[in-house]
Amino acid sequence: MDRAIYSKATGKNKLTPITSEWMHSLMKSHHLIAGLISEHGSPINLHHLPSFQKNIEDYAKVFEDFALDAQIFFARKANKSKTLARAALDAGIGVDTASFKELQQALDAGGQKDSLVLTAAIKNQELIRLALENDVLIIIDNFDELKLVDTHATALGKKCFVGVRLSGFHYNKEKLYSRFGFDIDRDLDELKNWFKKHNPTTNLELNGFHFHLDGYSIEQRGASALQSMKIISEFQQLGHDIRYLDIGGGILMNYLESKNEWEDFQESLRQSVAGKNGPITFRNNGLGYRISEDTKKVVGNLETYPYYNEINSSQFLKAVLEYSDEQDRSVADHLKKLKIQVRIEPGRSLLNQVGVTIAKVAHRKQDAQGNWLVALEMNISQLKSSSADFLLDPFVMYRDGSDSPEEIDLYFTGAYCLEQDVILKRKLTFPKLPAVGDFIVFINTAGYMMHFYETEAHLFELSKNLCIPNSKDRFEYSDISEDDTLNQSIVAIPLR
Ligand SMILES: *Cc1c(COP(=O)(O)O)cnc(C)c1O
């Protein structure tokens, strides 16, 4: 009889992640996970395609409700799996690509000129040629790039549509800084001139504008969209056939179940940093909070992704489209008036509930201070975001389900020979100490967490990416495919 059980972190400082049925179904199958890790090594990344398709549907529904002409491009950089690029195309949306390989793979997966966009920050000759040869829309970031793309288009004898990336929008009397794009205050005249002067001879045709803002502000996105549409209307009056505004990604998602837990955690962390209770993070890492030398008070901000968000995903998109100018005309109204398509490039938020990362326990030990360190066959680069920590309680899959008299506090550590290779900075409490060979499940890792900073230091293999193409109550070994081998088309939910 299988007495295996699984448990989320418990104790005082909980951060309960939102989970899906498919994750629980996996966590009940110790045997299945053991088989997968024995075949593919630890950790493995599992992707659930029906959840991805549902996220696509949810955004499509918002646009439908506004009766807007719209297109969604999945920002591929948030996850390396080829299968997701293919699933996006099969669901009828596009793919936003940011490098030669991303574009090449999206083309191989069946992407075509209308379903692909190239927004790479750096575009070299090879990448530009690949895009031009396949009539892929290129979003231009600067004048050098504009000239380079024009030169190559001329050399190839290709007519080519380009979009222009804008930045430097104004919000709340401040100018939003970005290192990307053309500045809306300085560069527009030169852009107008460039396209006017070159238009009869150039192979480039301007057909849209794009922005992607840092941060997660609805208002900044709304204001930037309104300012972009002023510019679009100017270009339309100059005779350019402008067809879309692409408002990029950065749509917030919500990872956590409880607002109270989220607020209590931050308060506890501040207390710990102030020395008022014991550390709740590894070596009392403040994750952005620190003690001011002058006032001896806790200062600073939590430097992590804002994991709890009431307005997220579809609601966030809806709020951007409803953002209004002084005459009470919304972004959606302006889009319709200009008769242009709105485009979004969500990465992280399309991957909500799509992935988990599962690693095997290698050993347990106590450090000199008596802290339990549970070492995983995994390293810090395999669960790393640009922020200070991933603040979601993981689960332990215990092979031996027998009870333990008391809970245990522990940290998960990794395989890099760095003192800082502590997979999560948080101290976690569990019903009992995981055993060697038990599995630790990190929830909702598909957006950036599993891939973006993954490195091969020490020559460790990169983690394997596996996919679950269909929904089921219970998964068998045969329900799970390797990313590279899943070549058949995914049966997608057709979009209206
Ligand atoms: C990163 C990026 C995105 C995706 O951002 P998310 O926060 O993952 O939604 C979209 N467009 C551009 C240009 C980007 O650089």
Image (cartoon, grey):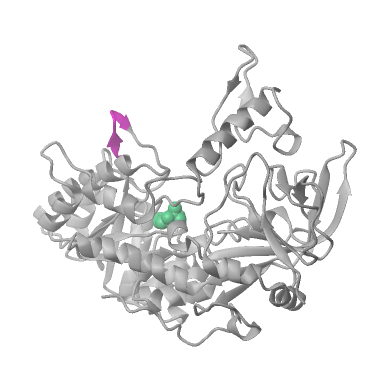
Q: Residue at x 46, y 69 (%)?
A: 51
Q: Is residue 172 magenta?
A: yes
Apparent side of residue 271 relative to residue 247 in the rendered image (left or right): right
- Across and down, in percent, residue 204 comes to 26, 65
Q: Is residue 254 visible?
A: yes
Relative to 347, is 329 above or below? above
**Quadrant of the drawing holding the C terminus:** bottom left
- Across and down, in percent, residue 380 comes to 70, 53
**Quadrant of the drawing holding the N terminus:** bottom right
The quarter holding residue 62 reads: bottom left
Apparent side of residue 429 relative to residue 223 in the rendered image (left or right): right
Between residue 147 and residue 480, name the one nearer to us. 480
Quadrant observed for ligand 1 in the rendered image: bottom left
The quarter holding residue 455 reads: bottom right
Between residue 377 and residue 281, name the one nearer to us. 281
Q: Residue at x 63, y 50 (%)?
A: 393
Relative to 83, is 429 above or below? above
Q: Residue at x 40, y 41 (%)?
A: 178
Count all numbered tags in the image, as a single digit: 0
In the displayed orientation, state which residue is furthest to the top: 294
Q: Residue at x 21, y 56 (%)?
A: 195
- Across and down, in percent, residue 206 comes to 23, 61
Residues shaded magenta: 169-174
- Across and down, in percent, residue 278 comes to 74, 29
